[in-house]
Image (spheres, grey):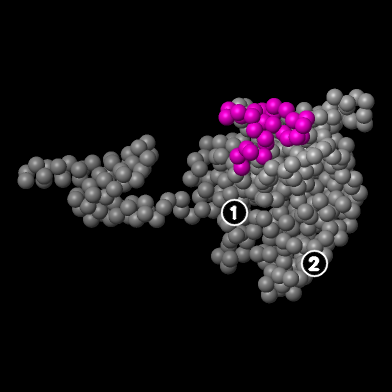
Amino acid sequence: MDTLRVGSIGLRDVGPFTQLDVQFPIKAGLSLVCGDNGIGKTSLLEAIVAVFSRGQLLRLKRRQGADAGRIMLEYETKDHVSTTEVKVQQFEPDQFDYLNTQLGDIASNVINVRAARDFIYQRQDGITRDPSLNPRHHGDRVANGLASSEIKSWFSNRYLLRPHAETSSWTSEMMENLDAAISYFSLLDPNVKLDRVDVRTFDIIVATPSGLVPFEYLSSGFKSAYILLLGIIKEIEFRGIGVAARDFAGLILIDELDLHLHPVWQREIGAAMKRAFPNAQIIATTHSPHVIQAAQASEVIALVRDADGNVKSRPVPSTKFGYAGWSLEEVLEDIMGVEDTKTPIFRAAMQNFDAAIDQDNADAVVASLDILREMLHPNNSTRKLIEIQAAPYIGAVSSTEGEQ
């Protein structure tokens, strides 16, 4: 397959953006887009999707008050840099722009994973064949996003027909992809693994610490991870690219990489995606400081609002070890733009304590200290600091009470 890399995107009067320019590393790896809710992370991904899509543009509108919006994308294939532009003219809810990408062949190398990542039990009455796609359909699949409902039929097909691989038209890449998909059942939790595909019902049965269950019965976290890992492999095979997942050198777009995942898995999911698809360019949005904490500085794209309310991409602090030594609070404040990670009730308690210290009011200091001790974690460093600050006043109050 041909390598596809996105180098930059420029948005003018599209969605929430007046003018936004974002640069991406033109290489395999992970780029994480972070920022406040409503700042436009999903819109940024949808703008990239639009360039490679066909059909109605359902998720983007021009900015209110503008005559038209523009999406300008720079991408690279075969060491050749190209630019393309999409106009966004509609604003009303019942009116849509129509996309008819001229990049049909390239669109086969673009996989779009939206934030709706769940599936329910579906009865399957047989093994089905893969869909037949042509370049026109690739633009449709990019626009529609990855279909999680296809994972079961694809996996049961591969698993049950594997004994016949040598006498059929299976390729070595298909064998490798199946082995990878089986291993991914245990990628985030070694206590969970694939047991079998039931030959009577075609259900995918997973072994868990609680027993054997159909994979539709697993937690939202497991299902979200399986949609990412198994779903992308399925999509690679359906596109007819003829490569193993580890050799896929296209573009993977993921909205809310951390969706439904436990914080421990959030910290691991970025590395897991890079191991599973080491030659792909992965651009993902995230709300999770755990995901950022495990990232390198070169992998983070932070969106912020300037003084006029316009969204911009800003530089982030860079260190040799990324953010591995940063606390979650430091990541939230300095990378993700959270102005204050403390609750209002805690801030008020701290202000009362500081005011009591400033006023040299021993009784108020001790009373404020007692409240803060109830709030803070026993090992919190702030607890130790305020106890040191309050020590002289504790002695004064104790002396006064003794004299009484």
Badge 1 amino acid: Gly
Instruction: Residue 112: say if magenta.
Output: no
Near-viewer residue (228 or 68): 228
Q: List the residue tagged with mark 1.
A: 35
The N terminus - image quarter: top right
Horizontal and vertical percent for residue 16?
65, 64
User: What number of labels is visible?
Assistant: 2
Q: Looking at this view, is 284 or 239 the one in front?
A: 239
Mark sitting earlier along the chain (2/1) = 1
| Magenta range | 193-221
Q: Secondary structure at mark 1?
A: loop
Residue at point 6% right, 44% down? Answer: 403
Which mark, by number, is residue 73? none
Residue 88 placement: quadrant: bottom right
Q: Nearer the viewer, residue 307 or 138?
A: 138
Q: Which mark is residue 97?
A: 2
